[in-house]
Structures are given as structure tokens and as C-alpha cells.
Amino acid sequence: MPEPINVITSRTITLPQENIDTDQIIPARFLTTTTRSGLGAAAFHDWRYQENGEAISNTPFREEDRASHKILVAGANFGCGSSREHAPWALLDFEFKVVISTKIADIFKGNALKNGLLPVEIDPDTHRYLIENPGMELIVDLANLSVSSPNGGVNANFVVEPFSRRCLLDGVDPMGHLLNQDAKIAAYEARRVTYS
């Protein structure tokens, strides 16, 4: 089950590149599992490690930043490419909670919402400011559909489809939402008139 999302306050990691596809988020050679656990180690693997397995020193994905940097700001068309649910799984396991861009690929967005990762599309001016100021602290408020900064430099709104928003706020996936309605479903069924 995803964790409930209401307000996330965190610093950003920025990737200004456009068209970051799902194979860059998690390379295909790591898609040999159907479980989520451990996929964070493969997130952006080829951007974090050399071919010999040595860590790349000048990457924005420094290990010590994971606990305090849960918001990824990326270039336009983030998550394009093949439809792989492993991509949001890897980002979540890497401890990201939010992805911000001007445009997030539709299939990736749907997979993210169903798995508890909040995809946020914002206006180009705010996005440019975030890219130019990496590591800044942001407040992402799902209840009020807003992104802001404590210093007032950022103030933007975003849209999330209402059912997905409800699921994220409650910390459930679509099936979990249905299961939470069990008592209401039973009461409805008890009221129904049956014909024989």
C-alpha cells in the first residue's frame, strides 16, 4: 500500500534534461523482478555508475541526499518511452515522493498515481526557476494542489485527477479504495430488492 500523501516538504534534485525515458529511469536489464523492493538501487543506474560499477562522483544522486531530497524536478516529457511500472517503483524505492516537470508522459503519470508517486505539472516560468535553483526547499501540498517555497519565491498550482488525488490522500491504490468501501457496498446490497 502507498503511504498517504498530504503535504511533502523536501529539497529538490534537478535533472534539466528533456525526454528522460523509462529506460533511463530504470534500464531494461533490471526488469527481471515483479517485486518493488530493491529497485531504488537501479534507479538512474547508468547516470550514477560507470560500466565498471564505480560510482560517478559528479551526479546529483548523492547517497547522502536521499533522506532530505524527495522531490525530483526534471525536464519536459519526463517518463516517456515504454510503459513499465518498474519506473515509478524504482523512484519510490529511491525515496522520491514527487516528480515535477512541465510535461509528464501520460502512461508514466498513470503508473505513478496508481503506485503512490505524485506527478506534478507546473508552468514553464516556475519550472525554469526550480531548474536554476537546484536543492531548494519546496512545499508540495496535494490537498490544496499547490507548490510553494518557504521564502516565497515559488507559488504555483497543479492539477490531479480527483479520484487519483483521493487515493493519494488516503494512501491507497484503486483496489484499496474499493476495499475501503466494503461496508457501503454491503449496505447497498442489503437494501436492494431482489427478484426471483
Image: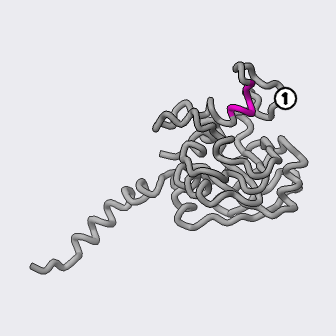
Residue 95 location in percent, x, y? Answer: 64, 37
Q: Tell me the quarter of the picture where residue 156 sits.
A: bottom right
Residue placed at 84% from the left, 62% from the top? 124
Q: Tell me the quarter of the picture where residue 56 sits.
A: top right
Compare residues 163 and 19 and report the one nearer the observer: 19
Where is 189 relative to 47, above or below? below
Can residue 7 be seen here? The reply is no
Compare residues 39 and 7 and report the one nearer the observer: 39
* Residue picked out by circle 1: 58
Q: Was residue 177 drawn as part of the magenta stretch in this picture? A: no
Which region of the structure is painted magenta? 45-50
What amino acid is found at the position of numbered circle 1 in the picture? Asn
Magenta-colored segment: predominant secondary structure: helix
Residue placed at 87% from the left, 61% from the top? 125
Relative side of 12 to 86, left or right: right
Residue placed at 88% from the left, 51% from the top? 151
Residue 140 location in percent, x, y? Answer: 71, 53
Compare residues 124 and 71 and report the one nearer the observer: 124
